[in-house]
Amino acid sequence: MRIRATVAALSGTLALSALAVPAAQADDAPKAAGAATFAAKAPADTAVGDTKITKITVNGGKDIVVGTTAKKTVKIAVTATDPSGIEDAVAFLWHGTSFDENNIDGSMVPETETGDCTAVNATTSTCTVTVVADPNVNIYSNILAGKWKVWTIAQGKDGDHVSDDAYPTSVSVKRAARLTTNASPEPIKKGKTLTVSGALTRANWDTAKYAGYTKQDVKLQYKKKGASSYTTLKTVKSDTKGNLKTTVTASADGYYRYVFAGTSTTPSVTSTSDFVDVQ
């Protein structure tokens, strides 16, 4: 699979042109065949005149969580200022070690050449573009989990412009997670041993399936019937297949659930609770 994107900002005109989103891999091509090549022809960090980018917000400041099939629409809002006002601003997301053809292995580019701009005042505007994270197209491998960077360019109405090829963002692209809880036997006599099982899985973008998240600390929590909050009973580590299993002593009717705090590549997740009738 080859990822290609060409960005042009020429002659005082702001534009993204010839954007080619990554072609879906052929059925006989393994998804884990290695990093795709991103051919980037875009102006790196430049500044002409007094245009400034003051803020960029990706996905409303929330991490981009991607599963194995559904597309995730992501908005990038670029706020820029220039004494003459802002003509336009656009951006896209990229992943890699540096902004050059050999080191970029992922991208999310908008389909439009211009941003949807709203004036804040006479000198400042916020321009928004939409990109898509698609596990069938551009989220093709687990290597893409983690921090991505923003390439952006803004232009003033007087032709001044500024571009940044690695604008910082706190947003990460993460592999969606699932977590289950099952307490048994039910019902159970007070004082007897209750077994609480479960499984922690997450999206594997290499295989387009969910797989066990191994050797992870997961909290077992309990809420007595009628109580308003959960308490943590213990921490359980997932096994080599992502399975969870522990025992507790049944004391009173209540709800059990597992809670995973998340990692740099996987979001936090809380299972649906399982109610146990203690007799």
Image (tube, rainbow, N blue to C red):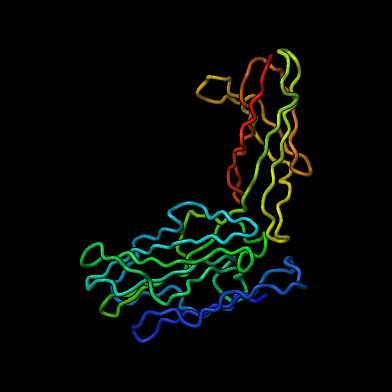
Residues 158 and 31: in front is 31
Residue shown at 69% from the left, 42% from the top: 200
The residue under the point 51% across, 63% down is 149
Q: Give the quadrant of residue 205.
A: bottom right
Across and down, in percent, residue 153 comes to 40, 72
Q: Position of residue 240 (x, y in %)?
A: 79, 43
Q: Quadrant of the N terminus?
A: bottom right
- Left or right: 63, with 114 as reference point: right
The furthest residue to the left: 122
Q: Residue 250: name its quadrant.
A: top right
Q: Quadrant of residue 207?
A: bottom right
Q: Quadrant of the C terminus?
A: top right
Instruction: Examine the rendered structure and indicate whether residue 159 appears above or below residue 223.
Output: below
Residue 194 drawn at (x, y percent): 74, 22
Q: Is residue 29 left or right of residue 122?
A: right
Residue occupying image coordinates x 69% and y 40%: 216
Q: Nearer the viewer, residue 168 or 174?
A: 174
Asked if residue 197 lies left or right of residue 69, the reply is right
